[in-house]
Image (cartoon, rainbow, N blue to C red):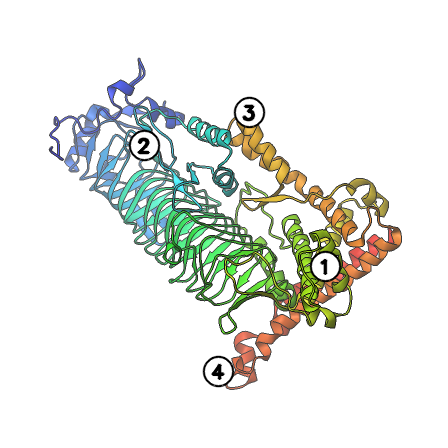
Amino acid sequence: MSTVSILSSDSIGKGFIPVEYLPEGEDEYYLRNSQNSSRKDRWRHLMSHEIEKLVLNGNTCDNWNEILVTDQFNTAQIKNSEFFGLVRIGNIRNVVLEHHELRVPTGITNSVIIACDLGDDVAIHDVRYLSHFIIGDRCILYSIDEMHTTNHAKFGNGIVKEGETENVRIWLNLMNESGSRNVIPFNGIITADAYLWAKYRDDTVLLERLKDLTQNSFDSRRGFYGMTGNQCVIRNSRAIKDVQIGSHCYIKGINKLKNLTINSSESEKTMIGEGVELVNGIIGFGCHIFYGCKAVRFILGDNSNLKYGARLIHSFLGDNSTVSCCEVLNNLIFPAHEQHHNNSFLIASVVMGQSNMAAGATIGSNHNSRANDNEVQAGRGFWPGLCTSVKQSCRFASYVLLSKADYPAELDIPLPFSLLGNNSASDRLEIMPAFWWLYNMYALARNSWKFQIRDGRKRKIQNIEFDYLAPDTAEEIFNARRLLEIWTAKASLRLNGKPTDGKNDDELAASGRELLAGPSETVNALEILGENMEKSNRKVVILKAYNAYHAYGDMLHHYAIKNLLAYLSVNREAGYAVILEGLSGERVRKWVNLGGQIIPEEDVDQIRSDIGSGKLRGWDDIHGRYDTLGEAYPLEKQKHSFATLCKLLGTDKPSKEQWTSALARAVEIQEFIRDQVYISRKKDFDNSFRQTTYRNEAEMNAAIGTIEDNEFVHQVREETEKFRKLAADAGSRS
């Protein structure tokens, strides 16, 4: 069968939409006209003297009657170019466009233009093939090999066009490599949508509705043109096919862009640079993609970056994230993810945001597991250390830090803010709960601040929770404290030679709680073993359980009072009686991290039900529900905080004396945070080995500053003073 066909000489620029897909009474330009409808009355035919000048300038056209222009048309700016089909050219003046010190005259030179609409004052030079595109005003297209659109272009959306079969639909295989959690990409999708779709696979009605409403959200007709918004610059590039490009986008030196929507605006400019190859994807606003990156079947959230040869395949990278020099396959990654190093792998995972992958980390790779249908689920704040290798399947609570190790078996770690270590010498897994709070407060406190200030989204589509203490992590802490109570009780029974299976969990928890309320020496003398956390027969040892248990309690207390003070700050005339009246109720215990937004599980279930029943009929409706829940979230968090305080105090209705005492204790905890932020950061400055590369202390201070120069240390001190004043004010109003 011949791979190159012979067509008639007049076929270029004609018959873009096959006849069988043209509605009755419409021509092949009817969709193009709808895309560019604001300018439908400005066009005119060329005058005879203009045609003569164009010919003298070395231009050719198969039919000059199909070249339409405006009244402000300078023939001198059109040289050595070929035109085919209906071409409409906006105002062309004798002016120069400048972008990043590149200055080019407006006009069209040395180019082939096929059935395109060109905006006002465009500069199109050395574009060897420009076909079926609508180009915005003041765009620069300079030295491009190929830029065209097919009649069945989908622009990265996973839809099926008229006459196509289901097998052409693009899916993303998220969270594992088997395709069992596949999701249809579409322009406007956010991580919450993807998680809702990929996670609840047993809800078959939900899956069918999501597929249908996604297909129905987009026009399945053939014949839409590729577009560039106003003031786009595309230069020194090779192939661009079936791409929608937002305004003010800058594209330079790319190898290939195919089947994409590239969102960009004046306030959130997207930039794509040298050696990049992107196929079948959606790119959010304000993204930067540079230096040899490859992405196939992907979604890139707003204000995110791919750099230095990164590979992103069958993956969703959430907002405010950066991936450099590494391989990311079959993942769903929530907002604020950092992965900067050349030799790290993240494969077949859902990572729930505010995460960091160190060099050499290998998470979920099928090279260290037996099958390709397993996965890793990591709560927010996940941080695997240098050269960490983790098998599938694993699950980690929030803010788990993995120390450098090759972990030999599957893991299920329910203890948040913990440090994991593989003690190969003793052949045991060691876990230190609450490690971040006890020993790395600077990093823990700074993370919340850092993620908020790095949230570069201009259009905050979703309410993302950046605070490390929130309802989801608070509930993890409650669960972790109960586990520590049970395991401590069992350790005491073992030490005394008594069986551990004679009591139920409630009895064990009560016994452990009593032990943990006593002297630390009693608990420290026990070998406390975790259970069901590693698929092995070796010991899982809990380190510093006593300190961790009480640290968890302080974290809950701080979380509760901090949010109750926020409630009183809004309700300026309120006192403790108003808190009792407005925030009392059962504690909501199950929360879902839905793409970075924390939502009660029952509300997520209601979303699923309303999608299935048709009450939520489209993605706009679903996003509207997210917004509604986001608006209610501060109060829901404050209610949860009050219930948390009640649980800590062991009462449903704390007295005024308990409230006053709780405020005083919260101030003490905030002062502890302030001091630990300083102490944990000061360790770096006191490290004698760090000082060895400097001639003297003066050189070191000049190079890296002093601990007293640290802006975040000062910020936490200021926050502590503010917290103290808020607590004093709350106490006076009680």
Q: Between disc 3 and disc 1, whose residue precedes?
A: 1
Upstream in the sequence, badge 4 or badge 2? 2
Closest to the observer: 303 or 423? Answer: 423
The mark that comes first in sequence, 2 or 3, is 2
How far across and down, in percent of the image, does residue 39 sit? 38, 26
Q: Nearer the viewer, residue 134 or 526?
A: 526
- Marks 3 and 1 sit apart, C-alpha to C-alpha, by 42 Å
Front-most of 57 and 322?
322
Please state which amino acid type lies under the numbered disc 2: Asn
Return the mark for residue 693: 4
104 relative to 524, above or below: above
Residue 20 percent location from the top left of the image: 26, 18
Front in this rendered view, residue 630 or 530: 530
For the residue carrying disc 1, how many other residues have a C-alpha within 10 Å: few (<14), some (14-19), or many (20+)? Answer: some
Quarter occupied by the N terminus: top left
* Labelled pair 4, 1 in contact (Cβ < 8 Å): no
Seen in the picture, residue 161 relative to 450 is either above or below; the reply is above
Q: Which class describes the residues within 10 Å of circle 4: few (<14), some (14-19), or many (20+)?
A: few
Per the image, the residue denoted by label 3 is 613
